[in-house]
Each structure stands twice: as C-alpha cells, then as structure tokens.
Amino acid sequence: MAVLPIRITGDPVLHSPARPVDRIDDDVRSLVRDLFETMDAAPGVGLAAPQVGVPLRVFTYGWVDESGTRWRGAAINPELWISPPPAGDPDLDEESEGCLSFPGERFGLRRAERAILRATDLEGEPFEIAAEGWLARIFQHEYDHLDGTLYTDRLGERDRRLVAKITRKLGWGGPGASWMPGVDHLEG
Ligand code: ZN
C-alpha cells in the first residue's frame, strides 16, 4: 500500500475521460487500496483514479453523514443518475465544494440533491446506493472526474476567472504538477 501523489489541474489525465475496468485483478485491487490510503492521508471524502494518474473508471469515497452513518467503499465502472440540479445561486455556507486536484480552495456549486450510484465493488458484486445531500454531492464530484471534468469546470464565469488567476499564480495548469498528502499539507 502507498500514499500516491495527487495530480493537480492541468495534468492531461484529469481532463480526459477514463476507460472502463475490464477485469478486477491484482492491479485494480492494489489501485483501490492506494486510493483509500491516499484519500485518508489527504484528507478527502473521495478520490478518483485519474487523480493519481490512472485513467480507469474507479473511485473511492468515505463519509460519515449527519446521522452518524459511515459510508465507505470503492465504485468500479459506476453509473450515476441524478435529480435535476436546483436553479439559482449556491449557498456558500452549505454548497461550497473543494477538490484535491485544485487543493486549498473552495467554491460554491449547485448540485443535484439526490443521486443513485450503481457500480461494482472490489469483489465484482454490483451494488446500488440511493444518496442524498453531501453523499450525493461526493458521488457527482467523483463521477465527474471519470469523465475528465473538474468541479471548477462547472463554476460560473466570475469564479472561473478566479480559478484561472489562481492557476496562473501557483504555476499550475500544465502536465506533471502534483502534491503529496502528508508532506505538502495543502488540504484539511
Ligand atoms: Zn475532485
């Protein structure tokens, strides 16, 4: 097991669609262990394989909801159905999102309140989770990564200008930039 460096916005692997997993072999099992370890070290509530440079349709999530229910797992070749996202501007207290591939920043973003995740677990068993609230947001965020979309791509024009400014200022936006959880302390 290993904590892996997390790719930062601009690296091509974050901006291209990932490909499906053909079979769950030792490489995929090892990848999922590393995703959990890296996600916990960051710390983050979700991590997608492209964020550690692997263009496969796999993500992990780990979240304890308001009622104390612990959600933790790996989603392989996921499908996602979402309710219509609400109209209007995001509430910055309740709807601010961050991303380990755009570390240290948060922006408000409206997301669907409900999502249904269908995926395969590490044992090859299909599962389905009907998620609400923050868990639904995590699934939408991680699923986006598998399509090469960052949450910053979904922001309004004003925030996108700010994102571009931060990207330039920090020297991000090109291939190869990454940070190391437990070493660089950019999150949490
Ligand atoms: Zn992210």
Image (cartoon, rainbow, N blue to C red):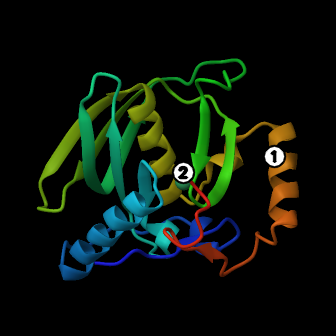
Residue 160 on image: x %, y %: 81, 46
Image x and y of residue 58, in percent: 35, 62
Q: Residue 51's spot in the image, x, y percent?
A: 51, 67
Q: What label does residue 50 carry, if any?
A: none
Left or right, 48 with respect to 148, comes to: left
Residue at point 45%, 50% (across, down): 143
Circle 1 is placed at which residue position? 160
Location of ligand 1 given as a quarter of the image:
bottom right
Q: Nearer the viewer, residue 71 or 137?
A: 71
Quarter of the figure with residue 118: top left
Q: Split into 4 quadrants, where in the image is the N terminus?
A: bottom left
Q: Earlier in the sequence, mark 1 or mark 2?
A: 1
The residue at 58%/63% (across/down) is 185
Give the mark count. Answer: 2
Image spot of residue 7 (x, y percent): 58, 71
**188 relative position to 133: left or right:** right
Residue at 71% x, 18% y: name it. Answer: 88
The answer to which of 38 and 12 lies nearer the viewer is 38
Q: Is residue 153 left or right of residue 19?
A: right
The residue lying at 13 percent from left, 61 percent from top is: 124
Marks 1 and 2, how far apart at CA: 23 Å
Of residues 35 and 115, the one drawn nearer to the viewer in this rendering = 35
Q: Which residue is mark 2?
A: 188
Q: Please tell me whether mark 2 sits on a helix, a strand or a loop.
A: loop
Amino acid on which disc 2 is placed: Gly
**1 and 2 marks in contact (CB < 8 Å):** no
**Dot 1 crowding, Cα within 10 Å, few <14, some 14–19, many 20+:** some
> Which structural element holds mark 1?
helix
